Amino acid sequence: MIRSMKILGYRCFEDFKLEEVGRINLVTGKNNSGKSTLLEALHLTINLADPFSLWRLLARRGEITEEILERRDYNVDINHLFCNHSYKNNHICFQADLDNIPIKLNVSVVKKDDIERDVKSNSFVGPYYLNVKDDYNNIDEYYPIYYNGGMSSSYAERMGSSSEYAVIKSYYLMSTSLLGSEISNNWRRITLKPEKIIALDALRIVNSDVVDFTVARDSKLVDSIGKEGILIKLRDMDSPIPLGSLGEGSWRLLGIGMALALVKNGIILIDDLDVGLHHSAMYDLWRLVDITSRKYNIQVFATTHSRDCINALGRYLQDNPNTGDVLIHRVEKDQNTPIVYSRNNIISATQHEIEVR
């Protein structure tokens, strides 16, 4: 588990510290205060800032350069990772205590001529490299970029998925719904494992008659638009129905359930936990997150803007005194530490309608 975190020079965080961390951590705050940025920093730290993770985060925000290398290939713009949206004269540092394993990750841009050892050449490179260095874990990698900070999507994809670099198992679930292809891939990883029940329990939050789910045999159907080919079997129905028939919230719940099923003894990061969900589903979702995280030793970091989400958590904590270490972290712009609310604070805020967002 992450025990503490320090962020220097990453996006809006010039110097930010997360010193009190629980098993379940709900991050709140106003728009543009740094909630998603905190999750990104945790994700990059866990995965040692590998190219695929960097590319994915930048592409998600639409932070790309204007140059198009070729069809279906584009450059993400790493300038936006740094304070003031520029890599020039700036660097990033992530420091974390991961179950007493120290991580100190330094990220900066260097000129090729200043590199003292040979690095892998690449047909897309310019005279600059993104250097990712962690002395504790013997990491000293150089990733080619263009002079303007562009990193090729083709290069990032060739370098492989972030799981190849990760210091601990993790899953970053973004605020957008999973594509059919992502659910299909996750389904293949859990379908014959006992943890599949977590995904089923997540779907049962919106429909208690869910018996099973599967992926259509025609993979082209799954990948085509994104929401075809995921089929749900309901009790007392002979034929399966499309997942979308259960509503948009079913996609979000299935994504959360699958992510929990995949990170035993790991960390899950969920941006906008409650997006697409009615307030009536939140209590049961917190029950699922709490029970699963305790049973499978999972640390949870999630963000929300929703009072309903927080109130549901407060009610759940009040009804279940053995939930353990649950915290709310309110991030405020230009403050270097969050305001931390303990279990008792959360319950009190719910009872007395105290604002903690």
Image (tube, rainbow, N blue to C red):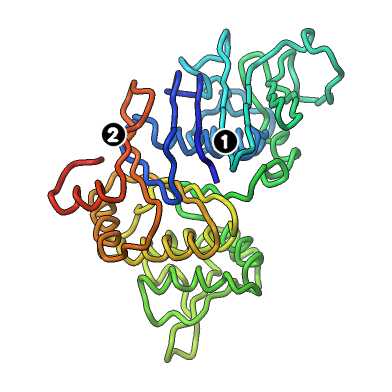
Q: Secondary structure at mark 2?
A: loop
At which x and y percent is residue 339?
31, 34
Q: At label 1, which amino acid type do we have?
A: Asp
Q: Secondary structure at mark 1?
A: strand
Q: Look at the image and tell me whether residue 73 can be seen.
A: no
Q: Quadrant of residue 290?
A: bottom left
Q: Which mark is residue 350?
A: none
- The answer to which of marks 1 and 2 sits earlier in the sequence is 2
Q: Give the residue at the far left of this rendering.
A: 352
Q: Nearer the viewer, mark 1 or mark 2?
A: 1
The quadrant of the picture occupied by the C terminus is top left
Q: Is 160 on the left-hand or right-hand side of 100?
A: right
Q: Nearer the viewer, residue 51 or 135?
A: 135
On screen, 204 above or below 75? below
**Which residue corresponds to the image point at 52% horizontal and 20% vertical from the top-left?**
82
Q: Is disc 1 surrounded by few (<14), some (14 to 19) or many (20+) residues within 10 Å?
A: some
**Which residue corresponds to the image point at 50% horizontal and 35% vertical from the top-left?**
4
Q: Is 107 on the left-hand or right-hand side of 230?
A: right
Q: Which residue is mark 1?
A: 97
**Which residue corresponds to the image point at 43% horizontal and 59% vertical from the top-left?**
252
Q: Give the residue at the far right of this rendering.
A: 118
Q: At label 2, which amino acid type do we have?
A: Lys
Q: Look at the image and tell me whether residue 16 can be seen.
A: yes
C-alpha distance separating marks 1 and 2: 27 Å
At which x and y percent is residue 334?
34, 20
Q: Which residue is mark 2?
A: 30
